[in-house]
Image: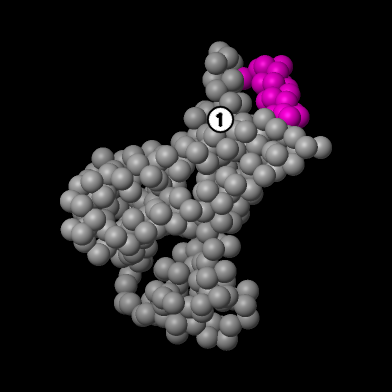
């Protein structure tokens, strides 16, 4: 562990849910997959994939870590970071954009050269560079430090770069959710200019709406929960029904049967939650 470096970690954004899931998995089952590293000139090893596993093991005070060694240069390291996460979908579009922009500005590659290196169409490269260039530097830094999440960053991106930091600070001060940030940005964009009074009005409306939702009667909240559960059950039953009607139960392949079993488990769990919610409503009615 002491020989590992994390220079390329700066291209990845910390996402609390993923971090927590990785930590729980390693705590329960241990390290199931090796991290990917490459040797450096100073006889250390630079991590290019497996940062969550590394951080989790570090928290658990692990003395060693399983790793696969590859031999790459600066350009191919960044390409490998993208390719290793391409199939799993674990890298966000902003993280992809951060790496593509680095290849363009730091490694001095043209968009055509990047598209060949990554085996991607040049329009994909152009979109990623455009994406990161539309975000204010301070907003990017806040996302990397997990001070705001990526979804809020995407909302702020809709604003001119010069206004993003100011609105980001308001979002943080008021502890706005992604949906509330979306409403705030919509309100700002509906005005011809960034007016402080207009922003204040938008914030007041959002906070008033938040208070209204918190004061909803408990019975109505539970009724909404029941409606949501029934909708989930209906979708899962519909899936199972469609799968069974395709070929008949005896002709379903083994891998599809496993998927159907998973959906049936979901239906069972949904019914359990539904039963508990109805019990709560009945208790409330008796009081």
Characterize the local packing of mark 1: few (<14), some (14-19) or many (20 or more) Cα atoms within 10 angstroms: some
Left or right, residue 118 beside residue 144: left
In the picture as drawn, the residue positioned furthest to the front comes out as: 286
199 inside magenta stretch: yes
* Identity of the residue drawn at 58% across and 62% down: 20
Magenta stretch secondary structure, dominant: helix
* Identity of the residue drawn at 45% across and 82% down: 66
Question: For the N terminus, which image quadrant?
Answer: bottom right
Which type of secondary structure does the marked residue at label 1 adopt? helix
The percent coordinates of residue 65 (x first, y second) are 49, 82
242 inside magenta stretch: no
Q: Which residues are drawn in magenta?
A: 194-217
Q: Pick the residue in front: 212 or 1.
A: 212
| Residue 37 falls in image quadrant | bottom left
The percent coordinates of residue 208 (x first, y second) are 73, 24
Above or below, 194 relative to 121: above
The percent coordinates of residue 116 (x first, y second) are 21, 54
Quick check: can you spot residue 95?
no
The percent coordinates of residue 120 (x first, y second) are 24, 50
Left or right, residue 125 beside residue 66: left
Left or right, residue 153 beside residue 176: left
* Identity of the residue drawn at 46% across and 42% down: 232
């Amino acid at each position: 562990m002491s020989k590992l470096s994390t220079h390329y970690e700066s291209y990845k954004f910390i996402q609390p849910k993923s971090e927590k899931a990785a930590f729980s998995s390693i705590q329960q089952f241990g390290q199931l997959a090796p991290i990917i590293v490459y040797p450096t000139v100073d006889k250390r090893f630079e991590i290019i994939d497996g940062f969550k596993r590394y951080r989790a093991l570090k928290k658990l005070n692990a003395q060693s870590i399983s790793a696969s060694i590859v031999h790459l240069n600066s350009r191919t390291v960044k390409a490998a970071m993208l390719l290793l996460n391409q199939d799993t979908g674990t890298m966000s579009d902003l993280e992809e954009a951060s790496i593509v922009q680095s290849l363009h500005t730091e490694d001095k590659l043209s968009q055509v050269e990047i598209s060949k290196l990554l085996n991607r169409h040049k329009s994909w490269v152009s979109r990623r560079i455009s994406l990161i260039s539309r975000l204010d530097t301070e907003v990017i830094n806040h996302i990397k430090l997990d001070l705001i999440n990526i979804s809020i960053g995407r909302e702020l991106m809709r604003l001119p770069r010069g206004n993003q930091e100011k609105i980001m600070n308001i979002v943080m001060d008021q502890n706005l959710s992604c949906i509330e940030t979306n409403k705030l940005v919509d309100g700002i964009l509906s005005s011809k200019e960034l007016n402080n009074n207009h922003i204040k009005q938008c914030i007041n409306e959002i906070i008033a709406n938040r208070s209204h939702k918190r004061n909803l009667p408990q019975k109505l909240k539970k009724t909404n929960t029941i409606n949501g559960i029934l909708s989930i059950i209906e979708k899962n039953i519909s899936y199972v029904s469609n799968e069974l009607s395709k070929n008949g139960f005896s002709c379903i392949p083994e891998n599809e049967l496993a998927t159907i079993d998973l959906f049936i488990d979901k239906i069972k769990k949904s019914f359990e939650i539904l039963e508990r919610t109805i019990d709560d409503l009945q208790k409330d009615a008796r009081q």
